[in-house]
Image (cartoon, helix red, strand yellow):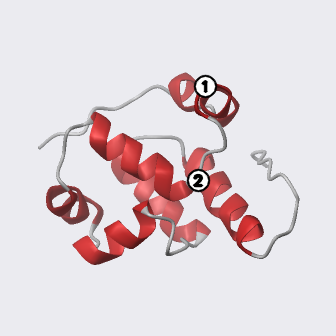
Amino acid sequence: MSIRKVSERKFRLADLEKKHGPMTFGGFVRAFREAEEISQVEFSKKLGLSRANLCDIEKDRKSVAPERAARIAKKLGVPESTLIQLALQDSLRAVKLNYRVVLRAS
């Protein structure tokens, strides 16, 4: 199993949301896995997660800390900022705070 490296331009959140609507961390991970045509079992091994944990993340039943989001981004070859932003946005959405997360490198 090999996961292709992808360009940062391809994963700008604003572009993805314009095309697909509001994006969640789990939705992104599920879409990525399905696009690569990888089973949950194979993908969970690649990410170092249990299959049940991956399933909970993909169905937005489990949130992901920014540190874990960064590790997953590295393993997928996508920009850390994209997955960290999604993880933080999901945290705000879960507690019904109507804010928009925007990340900038310092």
Which residue is the site of mark 1?
19
In the rendered structure, the answer to whether residue 17 lies left or right of residue 11 reads right
Alpha carbon distance from label 2 to label 1: 14 Å
Q: Count numbered badges in the picture.
A: 2
Which residue is the site of mark 2?
24
- Determine the residue positioned at 66% across, 43% down: 22
- Determine the residue positioned at 41% across, 61% down: 58
Residue 12 placement (x, y as % from top left): 62, 31
Residue 40 placement (x, y as % from top left): 22, 59
Residue 9 placement (x, y as % from top left): 57, 23
Amino acid type indicated by mark 2: Thr
Q: Classify mark 2: residues with Cα within 10 Å, few (<14), some (14-19) or many (20+).
A: many
Amino acid type indicated by mark 1: Lys
Residue 2 location, quadrant? top left
Q: Secondary structure at mark 1?
A: helix
**Relative to 1, does residue 52 appear above or below in the rendering?**
below
Q: Nearer the viewer, residue 105 or 52?
A: 52
Circle nearer the N terminus (2, 1): 1
Quarter placement of the N terminus: top left
**Relative to 37, does residue 86 appear above or below in the rendering?**
below
